[in-house]
Amino acid sequence: MRILVVNPNTTASMTTTIGECARAVAGPGTLVEAVTSSAGPPSIESHYDEALSVPGILEAVARGESAGADGYVIACFGDPGLDAAREVAAGPVVGIAEAAMHTASLLGRGFSVVTTLARTRGRAWELAERYGMHRFCRGVHACDIPVLDLDRDPDAAKVITEACRDALEHDGSDALVLGCAGMADLCSRVSRELGVPVVDGVAAATLTVQSLITQGLSTGSRGEFASPPTKQYTGFLDRFGR
Amino acid sequence: MRILVVNPNTTASMTTTIGECARAVAGPGTLVEAVTSSAGPPSIESHYDEALSVPGILEAVARGESAGADGYVIACFGDPGLDAAREVAAGPVVGIAEAAMHTASLLGRGFSVVTTLARTRGRAWELAERYGMHRFCRGVHACDIPVLDLDRDPDAAKVITEACRDALEHDGSDALVLGCAGMADLCSRVSRELGVPVVDGVAAATLTVQSLITQGLSTGSRGEFASPPTKQYTGFLDRFGR
Amino acid sequence: MRILVVNPNTTASMTTTIGECARAVAGPGTLVEAVTSSAGPPSIESHYDEALSVPGILEAVARGESAGADGYVIACFGDPGLDAAREVAAGPVVGIAEAAMHTASLLGRGFSVVTTLARTRGRAWELAERYGMHRFCRGVHACDIPVLDLDRDPDAAKVITEACRDALEHDGSDALVLGCAGMADLCSRVSRELGVPVVDGVAAATLTVQSLITQGLSTGSRGEFASPPTKQYTGFLDRFGR
Amino acid sequence: MRILVVNPNTTASMTTTIGECARAVAGPGTLVEAVTSSAGPPSIESHYDEALSVPGILEAVARGESAGADGYVIACFGDPGLDAAREVAAGPVVGIAEAAMHTASLLGRGFSVVTTLARTRGRAWELAERYGMHRFCRGVHACDIPVLDLDRDPDAAKVITEACRDALEHDGSDALVLGCAGMADLCSRVSRELGVPVVDGVAAATLTVQSLITQGLSTGSRGEFASPPTKQYTGFLDRFGR
Amino acid sequence: MRILVVNPNTTASMTTTIGECARAVAGPGTLVEAVTSSAGPPSIESHYDEALSVPGILEAVARGESAGADGYVIACFGDPGLDAAREVAAGPVVGIAEAAMHTASLLGRGFSVVTTLARTRGRAWELAERYGMHRFCRGVHACDIPVLDLDRDPDAAKVITEACRDALEHDGSDALVLGCAGMADLCSRVSRELGVPVVDGVAAATLTVQSLITQGLSTGSRGEFASPPTKQYTGFLDRFGR
Amino acid sequence: MRILVVNPNTTASMTTTIGECARAVAGPGTLVEAVTSSAGPPSIESHYDEALSVPGILEAVARGESAGADGYVIACFGDPGLDAAREVAAGPVVGIAEAAMHTASLLGRGFSVVTTLARTRGRAWELAERYGMHRFCRGVHACDIPVLDLDRDPDAAKVITEACRDALEHDGSDALVLGCAGMADLCSRVSRELGVPVVDGVAAATLTVQSLITQGLSTGSRGEFASPPTKQYTGFLDRFGR
């Protein structure tokens, strides 16, 4: 079984971390390949960044299809391009916000999300609603560390842990979700310090895709998610014609 | 890793089928044990049956805790006793309706449920809402076959397949959910005939629990789902004192 | 007219209080009988306790049916076993959370609930949603007094009154609901001190059942709430076969 | 105990029927007085009619306050003027749609409403949502008989019964609500013919008000529903200054 | 194009302000006429005031119809009589709360409302829900200045600006709505001081009606909003018969 | 005042039609410029097409900013790139689905949408929910004519009119929305034939943007919709770095 984990930004070091987190949970028969987007922003911190990460994701999925991938993880907490990728891929596609929220909803009555910049909270709420997880999501909190500083800032782990502690206290939640692929390696630390289950979307999504493939399940293709109609694309996007 | 799959009714033949379906998807390192409830109704077809299946479930979970189970599946589509089991178990507990609906929501914009008796539809809707899956659930349909006839009735597979076809057409759904543990072995047949993904709750829940255990996740225990306060029980339920 | 008020726990002194509160509001032609559950926990403070109070409730209702009861009140704020009891009883069945919330919604735009232990708040919210009262319920607050201490703790009334005052201020509510059958006798005191309407579920449910009986109304029995299918029960629950 | 039942239209014969239905369920110590509005439309079949029935209702309530009424029923299924009347009255005020829907929600998972003209269905849905009863209301159906023909049309009872039968079948409901004060006397007939509980708002509201008064409960007056600020009114509404 | 802006209270100085604000945004071909209600309260600060402002509004609309008005603005933030006016008017009718909330929802993910007296907040929330704007409305805040003091109180502008600042900080909103027609002239000042878009309902509603008329759109009249059935009115409302 | 209407697909003839419809309603002082996307699909009929139309839209908006546009219309019924465009533009940005649904909600209790291909209905529902218009949207219906055939197919107008008639009858709606920019010129014909208000998103959005500009309103920029953080883009999207 081959799962392609797509890092929608162009920062290769994040891809490495993401790949490691995915492989750490994948089953023995599962091959996890992590790829970096070939075009777009180095990190995703606005609707603008997110929208412009989608072509790179779709290109990665198209390559995955040619190479025989069985399923896909979109490893950005905004779950960019999820619907489009589902039309294009034969196998299942799961976003990390989607998987993390579904997973956290199984751990109690409510969870809190801790994410990077405050401006991304609106998108997290929008996704929570879309996935039906609004009723479990008690708060989306920002630690105010830019994505690419998560690695560089020596205080990042501490700041995030404190933001998580505050979130728990404020929301009275049963579980936490870390709202950025770049936080994937912090889960166990935060969980140990705060004594609550902490969900990382990369791990959750990898296992969700693996489970779907095991069950032989993929996106239904009889309606909205059938293959897109064939048509010629023009301009700097001409490569996307099908 | 040990997963205990609890059949909340007292019919051992159903436990056998359920155990087989769970084992068919479990990973190589996962030991699946299926147990039959020691007390209560032979099948669950009313709120009365469901309520009275809960003591048997909680007894099975208590035994699982003593025996070192890492997680639990409650294998009845009404997800009886889920909250109580989560208080008692150290590891994760997942209901088959819960897992099936979450899974189906990843396969498109909407799914249809096909269940046994019409009178159980209300409970399925209630669970859909509780899990946030209401927005994906486009219809709950009955095939009008009693639970224990699913095995005996030679026409059962055909009747269920037709009910699924009607549900798909009526609801315009992307995926199907079979709404009874006793239908677990029909998934691939229905999927093949109708050309849509069909989710079986037993498989979905087994893999969901396995994924949670792999991630080291369990029910949060700092609030609502902490261990129940110790107290003495009386009467024919005295065994449940803790 | 005979109304059976079922105390779902096994503490007889609470049954006495509950019975008195019910009789204090019942009409001249109404005979109120309060009964203590014959099996289960002495108080209900967890999902575990609540689930295991249901067999005792159903036994009491079955006896009520034999003895000619016209309607039932389930006197625990978690409204345990309500759906099952409705299938079994010929007459109406009302839970005290249900009746209290409906009643409070008639008194303004929003109400606050003050209950016992913090861990029971999740269930209160779940019921509020189920009954459609979510939109009126502005907060569920705990006074952190265990159920059986409500009677014993000399400061209980004061602590609860203060919790109610805080709730009112925080939520800006028009009315209060006391969220435990064991608080039934505090209503008038709290109302007098705080100058707001305070609803006790036992009184509200008793009058609601009385009103339903007066109107000749009972649970509809043409679908989901028809009598449960007859079947043989086994193990320590064999008495529940029908 | 004195309950004032206000007929918001100016048709005295409807007031007579309404009063009889209210008295038929009121307890021995309850005095029911039914009054006809002194101004406005002879029947309420549009938003225009409904809006213009409110001054007459408020006048009747003001008179009730002077005369010592303990509570009020507003006997039109659009529940006109409910919020305003609650500001003005010292005792509780209940609308017949409000009471009927609350009551019907206690009788199963869903109810259907059968009302007069199709154009009034929107208001019924709006009220269902306002009261939190949207989740229980499965359909609002019209029998297409104008209000004042309910009495005159010899086929009215038959037409309404058939509309009820169709509604039940279409909606799969557990109970029915008759959506007009002018249908109050048809309840038992429809219930007998169709074998389901049928709720009449006049009876339901009368008993609801009686129950509130028995519990010493009235609209909370510390915020939104405090007495309206005193001010001078002008023009043909000058009588409403306070 | 003629737009009639109806001030639902009887205070002519407010009508002057409202008319100026409407004219300030209307297009060159649009004639705005502002009228004062001929009957009812001098300001609207309770459900009672609001209900009793409706006859005056409907009278103004009826006159507008005779005089050839093409559309109507109801210039009170409670949007009184909106449905009734839509039945009576041939052209579009828009309330200022309705227009303001719709407009604000286009300016970001959430807005805050700042209104006059605290007791009017419930109505604002109710309207937000009715218009589907509940999801955008993050808070309704009161400045506690009575309507008629908005003009007279020399500190009014300052108090309102501070209430707006607090609302923004508390709610984290993208935009503000001023919740009273009497605040229409404060928009630009608050916007300048706080650096956020501030919506005035009078301007928003005037432009919304103008846009509807330009598109040739009016209330659909094939169902609920058809002309009210003709009937004779009696008492002090006899002028409203049609 | 300059409004830029962006046609997100690359078909210039559609841009011409869209521009004409926009100009037909714009005020005398409003300059409407319609532009065709420079890259992407010739029509938008899948999530894939829609996602890949966004870079072209953002490029057009960036050019508009340089050229001094005061506001923007995104003229595809999927409202692609709306959030991203709002971050980038100084002035207001409105989608045609957004404007059409808001507008239709002012015309009665419910509207029906008639769109092109059945597979696009899911997106329309998603937008309806996002805008809070879900409660007004009674149905989304497909006429099954591909976007580029709307112009070429001689029967298109007739087929669409019939789909509209069916939608009205099925949904009992007060108004219609035509769910594709390519249908903009059919509004008056359908309205005339069916006797209901019919909303075209291009006209509605143009007037909405014009109204916002007139009021001096634009997207709030203090939080989620502030300018995107500056960063370098790579690959075939390098032109999007800021």
Image (tube, coloured by chain):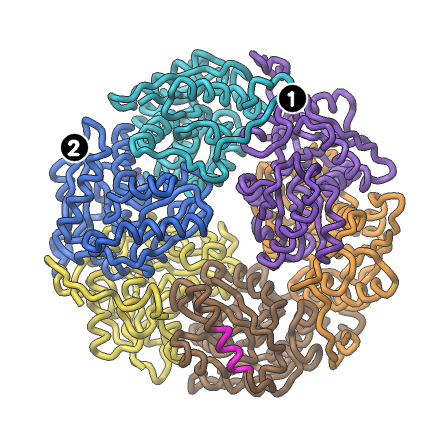
Chain colours: A blue, B cyan, C purple, D orange, E brown, F yellow
Q: Nearer the viewer, residue C131 or F205?
A: C131
Amino acid of disc 2: Leu
Magenta stretch secondary structure, dominant: helix
Q: Position of residue F185 (x, y in %)?
A: 34, 67
At a point 76% along the width and 69% down the height, the residue shown is E233
Label 1 crowd (10 A; few <14 / some 14-19 / many >=20): many
Classify mark 1: helix, strand or loop: loop
At a point 29% along the width and 51% down the height, the residue shown is A158
The image shows a total of numbered marks equal to: 2
Dot in front, 2 or 1 = 1
- Residue C39: mark in rendering: 1
The reply to whether residue D95 is visible in this rendering is: no
Q: Position of residue F190 (x, y in %)?
A: 42, 63
- Residue C96: mark in rendering: none
Q: Nearer the viewer, residue A42 or A67?
A: A42
Q: Is residue D76 shown above or below F57?
A: above
Q: Is residue F7 magenta?
A: no
Q: Quadrant of the C terminus of chain C?
A: top right
Q: Is residue E157 magenta?
A: yes
Q: Nearer the viewer, residue F31 or C166?
A: C166
Q: Nearer the viewer, residue E85 or A174?
A: A174
Q: Is residue A16 shown above or below E148?
A: above
Q: Quadrant of residue A144?
A: bottom left
Q: Chain of mark 2?
A: A
Q: Quadrant of residue F177?
A: bottom left
At a point 55% along the width and 42% down the height, the residue shown is C118
- Residue A31: mark in rendering: 2
The reply to whether residue E51 is visible in this rendering is: yes
Magenta region: which residues? E156-164
| Marks 2 and 1 close (CB-CB < 8 Å) | no
